[in-house]
Image (tube, rainbow, N blue to C red):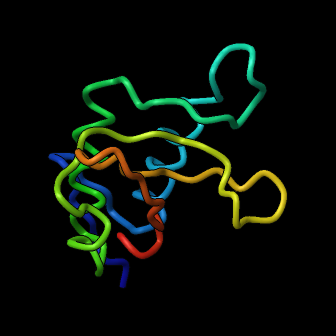
């Protein structure tokens, strides 16, 4: 039986539905103008920030990902990935950033 997921006040009947919402947000940020698709871009929509904040708190290593606190989020191509692997990154209050896995959060 499918396990429902609730994130930031949004209800999803399945993990697949929650993952689809994450992908929708991920692809809402195609890259900074003039830098090409997939280049670093800050997440600016307050609803997206609230969703990603709740999402990263579900990560099994949330304390490590969040560090000193969340200043924001960005989308960029993972330097460790093959091809055009786009990822969410937590921007910490100390200025550092780290990627996090959607799958591990769900």
Point out the image quarter for the C terminus.
Answer: bottom left
Residue at the limit of the structure toward the front, as seen here = 94
Q: Quadrant of residue 93?
A: top left
Total labels drawn: 0
Q: Is residue 21 above or below residue 3?
A: above
Q: Quadrant of residue 50?
A: top left
* Direction from residue 22 to residue 2 in the image, left or right: left
The residue sitting at 64% across, 28% down in the picture is 31
Image location of residue 65, percent across then percent down: 32, 66
Decide which of 66, 43 is in the foreground and name it. Answer: 66
Q: Quadrant of residue 32?
A: top right
* Direction from residue 24 to residue 71 in the image, left or right: left
Decide which of 2, 28 is in the foreground and name it. Answer: 28
Q: Is residue 63 above or below residue 23?
A: below
The residue sitting at 18% across, 48% down in the picture is 8
Residue at the limit of the structure toward the right, as seen here = 83
The residue sitting at 38% across, 41% down in the picture is 73
Q: Is residue 60 above or below residue 106?
A: below
Point out the image quarter for the N terminus.
Answer: bottom left
Decide which of 68, 13 is in the foreground and name it. Answer: 68
Image location of residue 15, percent across then percent down: 41, 68
The residue sitting at 21% across, 59% down in the picture is 6
Residue at the limit of the structure toward the bottom, as seen here = 1
Image location of residue 42, percent across then percent down: 45, 30
* Direction from residue 73 to residue 56 in the image, left or right: left
């Amino acid at each position: 039986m499918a396990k429902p997921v609730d994130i930031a006040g949004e209800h999803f009947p399945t993990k697949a539905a929650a993952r689809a919402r994450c992908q929708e947000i991920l692809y809402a940020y195609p890259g900074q103008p003039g830098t090409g698709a997939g280049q670093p871009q800050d997440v600016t929509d307050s609803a997206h920030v609230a969703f990603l904040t709740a999402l990263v708190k579900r990560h099994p290593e949330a304390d490590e990902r969040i560090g000193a606190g969340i200043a924001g989020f960005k989308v960029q191509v993972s330097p460790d990935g093959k091809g055009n692997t786009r990822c969410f990154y937590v921007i910490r209050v100390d200025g550092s950033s780290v990627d996090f896995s959607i799958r591990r959060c769900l």
